[in-house]
Amino acid sequence: MSEVIGFLLLGIGSGALISGVGMGVVLSYRGAGVINLAVGAFAMLSGYFFWAIRSGEFASIGTVPAVVLTLLFSALLGVAFELLVVRPQRSATPLAKLIAALGVLLALQAAVILAFGQSAQPQPTILPAGNVIIAGVPVAWYNFIIAGILLVIAVVFMALYRWTRFGLGTRAAAENQAHAMFMGLSPNRLSLANTVLMTVMMGIVGLLSASITEVDSQTLPLLIVPGLAAAMFGRFTSFSVTFVAGVLMGMAESLLLYFSTESWFPTNQGGPIPGYDELLIFIVLVVAMFLRAGKIPARGDVLERRLPAAPVPRAPVRSALIYGAIAAAALYFLPGGFRGALITSLISAILLLSLVITTGFLGQVSVVQLALGGVAGFAVSHFATNFGIGFPWAPIMGVLLAAVFGLLCGIPALRVRGVSLAVVTLAAAVAIENFGFGNTTWGGGVTGSYVPPPSLFGFNFGPNASLHGLDGIEPSPLFGWFVLIVLVLLGLFVCNLRRSGLGQDMLAVRANERAAAAAGINVQYTKLLGFTLSAAVAGVGGALLAYNYGSITADSYDTITALALIAFAYISGITTVPGAIWGGLIFIGSITAYALQDWFGIQGEWFTLIGGLLLILTLVQRPEGVATAMFYGPRPSLRALRLTRRGGGPPGGSQIADRVGEAKVAS
Amino acid sequence: MTTPVLEVADLSAGYTGAEVIRHISLTVGGGEVVTLFGPNGAGKTTTLRVISGVVRASRGRVLYAGRDLARTSPTARARAGIAHVPEGRGIFFGLTVAEHFRLGYRGARIDPRVVYEYFPALEPLKDRRAGLLSGGEQQMLAVGRALARRPQLLLLDELSLGLAPLLVERLLPVVRNYAEDSGCAVLLVEQHVQLATEIADRCYVLSHGDIVLHETGARLAGNPGLLIASYVGQQSAGPGQQGDGAGSGG
Amino acid sequence: MTALLQASGITVSFGSVQALAGVDLDVRAGQLVGLIGPNGAGKTTFIDAITGFVPARGRVMFDGRDISAAPPHVRSRLGLARTWQTIELFDDLTVHENLAVAATRPTVGSSLGELVLGRRQRAEQHADDAVALLELAEFAGRMPSELPQGKRKLVGVARALAGRSKLILLDEPASGLNTAESLDLGQRLRRVADEGVAMLLVDHDMGLVLNICDEVYVIDFGHLLAHGPPGDVRRNPAVLAAYLGGPADAAQQLDGETAASSAERAGEAQ
């Protein structure tokens, strides 16, 4: 039993790192109104910077000057982030701000991979080594040091926000920007100061993390998921609650690690089941959301830009025939590598279509769509390998299963929307990837899960079918044509949806939930139906992806790709079918990416980097997306800049009845 | 004639392309209290928001002490001495009373003593959060917070909104006194006609975005029919009482 | 003849503040009823309570049915529509689509037809009628953001009409309109009422309300202050006192009391 105490203490170091990321989220939200998915990525970048100037990659200088330089670098990073991303997005919706931060996350990850490679780097630690034996378990000193430093930071922030003019100003500006301006406060400067504070703190987290983990492109950035859970417990407001929640989560993870060695712990292929800690974080986040999300204070920002318009499709059948014919010919005549990349593009376009429904029509950002595709993909694989069920029943059942999962994921959307939904679906995606797909029984494990090629009445039309392209090389154009037909049908389906009564209801819900209810729309039913339809489309994409790969692992449907999918959807146009199709053509692994690599030797990571940067640029310059603008433009340049008033205070007090009634539901 | 503290000339503005106010001109001099009347939706609040800079004018000019404010941000306008107390108080429910007086930019001169002098009722409530104050106390805090900055131009939007008349009777004279004591120009949007006409030097009446009446406070106070006519519409107004353009004012 | 809408004892509280205190109000079929009162009197809250957007005590009978507990979309489908002070159009849909959303309820069958076969739903007659009645035909294909304020207000009314409504609650349809637009709106509303659609009109433009309504209710501080034909209400000194903050004697003789109780007394006195 005493070992339990020891393991609990072992977790406080990594728990404090979670707290640090969580507090970074709080700072970003209070100071700049951003649910900042890139917080962990800033810590990663500082970690790499420190490693590079210590290890000889860039320089090899002493610890103390390197620490100082790293913190300076972090501060500059904050200034750049504020000026290039936060400030241009000042008047954007919380959702657009979150997406912009997503662009930063993707760009930073890709940048470090390009600069330093995929593998982790041994970042030198700045904390003393050595253990103390507690309850029979050797606990490293650094755990206490890290937790201590972050506790001090939490206390400093609390004091800063409570007693200083800067803190009061930040609280005031967060509650109501216009009122703060009337008092001569500058929301811009307050936001800058908070952002720099955030990046410097993340610099410290990056430095401290060296004792616990090597620096790589995944670990610290994805710490954002537990960090968000901690911040949600603190209602994106309280540093103390966020700190405690983070440390407790670290301790719980450590305890689970201890339990995983026990005989009663569920196992998979001889080892403890994978992904249990991601599942834990997801559950914690859902609990946090249900307990606290309703109480997250809405920010009273002055201006709000809306989601891009979703124009009615023009002559979809004609476009489908023309572009379909071109694609069909290309699938036969293009050389093998290009053909494969084109097929990938077409499948990506299907996955992007599912985002057109959830985000474009319904106005909800869901990160879980690719994972839903994975549900269908693994279902296809396991139905075939375990039960001998093949095409078309396996993919049909897979798609239905994905739709059921989509319905389940839609349930939180009844309670929370926009930003909170994006956060909870992000955690769901991570949990499904690790707990679901990482498991050999119902996922792919490490070795992967075999997917037999699709065939009907003995006629194989998978990537390895006997009919080859003009150059006689696989993949077979038959499979490409099959994907193309599915894409064309689904594209027309989504076009019809936009014109249908149901699609109009969705857009009405997206525009204004209260007015939609007043017009007789059952908002909850419409949302659930939208999520289910979208999940089914994602399921089709995921099943086709499985056929395309032939063997799938958790990495086939990983969360970073899911995030990139959202980025590219936004770049190309998240509200229209052409947006989805062009998005597919420029996505990671797409025909464009292949061409650039083939002709100019440009690596795939450049695509993520450019994608991330383009996303930020798109959000500022062309919020409707490049392809949508191309197909449906020119739209009136005077985008609706609407003044909104948000009730910020607690009910009661002296809120005047009529005004309370008017206070718009934050959407 | 000295330069008025505020001069609004031929001002038009609105939201999403719809003009809410059209060709409005008005002035407020130092130490003067000027009231803007008009039914809801007439454009009173928009006028104040254009003056403090959160809504951009589509046409016309706002001159503050003779200086054109077109290129001045709301923050800079506030720092130059314009205090705007918006509809719905303009205070922060999450902050305590005392915190409101520590809130400020670097170099801001905020003197809570001024406030406690004009509103002694606030002093014992120093450590209470603004969200927990009564409506009247909140409004005192909002006005007090504005006075503490010793503004040269005070914009007050619907102080009486949701307050019992008794409270308004206490609040408005404080504003009058302050204007006289300090030489501050006050532009007041108000629905409480009787009290507002009593303390105002001059009044403008705004209807559907146009100024339809411009009168001295004294004349309007003595002849409420003028105002009722512009509120209730032509049918109830006697002939010749309908304000149809700017009359001669002070 | 029983009333189409019978609201009795409607009470709404926000925390410790009582926004509405037991308001009774009836609207008969085809009647145009005005609801006026100073800012903050509780008019919008009343509309919210009747349409189900704020929790309220009291009983709401509509078309012979008790709808006190029904969610907003159900009340809407029964024929109880509303507009908003801030208009609240669906900015992502064209004007015609805005109306179509209210006019048609997609069913599983119709949705399948539309999604799979691309068939268009046909039950949009009411949307076209509303467009015709309010003369919005030339704007039907435009986006709401491209329309002038006055027309957007009309689209809001048209959307409420399009849902086969029996009663429309209008929240400040004339605010932000210029004088000519306001007069024009008044005439159109009168015409809609004459077609048999009942309306409850909340507006600050007393001229508009008193000129076009059959009956007027006045509330202040959440209490019903007066009720009767426009002519009576227009001459009621208590109403003017409440509305203009007391230019008349009423306010002075009640020195020291809250407006709510003074208003109540004045209401009872007549």
Image (cartoon, coloured by chain):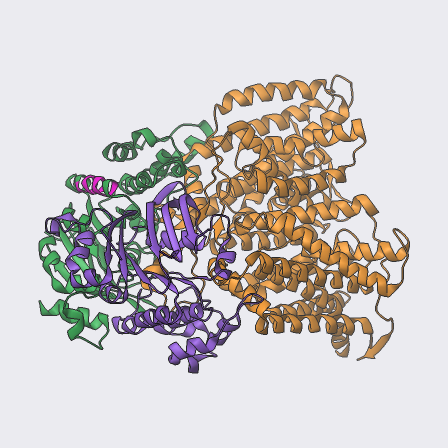
Chain identity for the colour green used in the image: C
Magenta segment, which residues? Answer: C181-190
In the image, farthest residue toward the front: B1
| Foreground pick, A440 / A337 | A337
Residue A646 picture location, percent across and down:
43, 57
Q: Quadrant of residue A653?
A: bottom left
Q: Nearer the viewer, residue C241 or A217?
A: C241
Q: Is residue C102 magenta?
A: no
Residue at horizontal 47%, vertical 57%?
A: A178
Asked which quadrant contains residue A491, the reply is top right
| A66 sits to left or right of A580 | right
Question: Residue A180: x, y in percent?
Answer: 49, 61
Residue B143 in the image: x percent, y percent? Answer: 39, 69
Q: Where C117 falls versus A58 (above or below)?
A: above
Q: Where is A660 relative to B144, above or below?
A: above
Q: Could you say which is closer to the camera, residue A498 or residue A606? A: A606
- Check residue C185 for magenta coloring: yes
Residue B111 falls left or right of residue A113: left
Whether residue B4 can be seen here: yes
What is the x, y in percent for residue C134? 25, 35
Name the colour assigned to chain B in the rendering: purple
What residue is at 35 percent from the left and 49 percent from the top? Answer: C86
* Chain with orange colouring: A
User: What is the quadrant of the C terminus of chain C in the image?
Assistant: bottom left
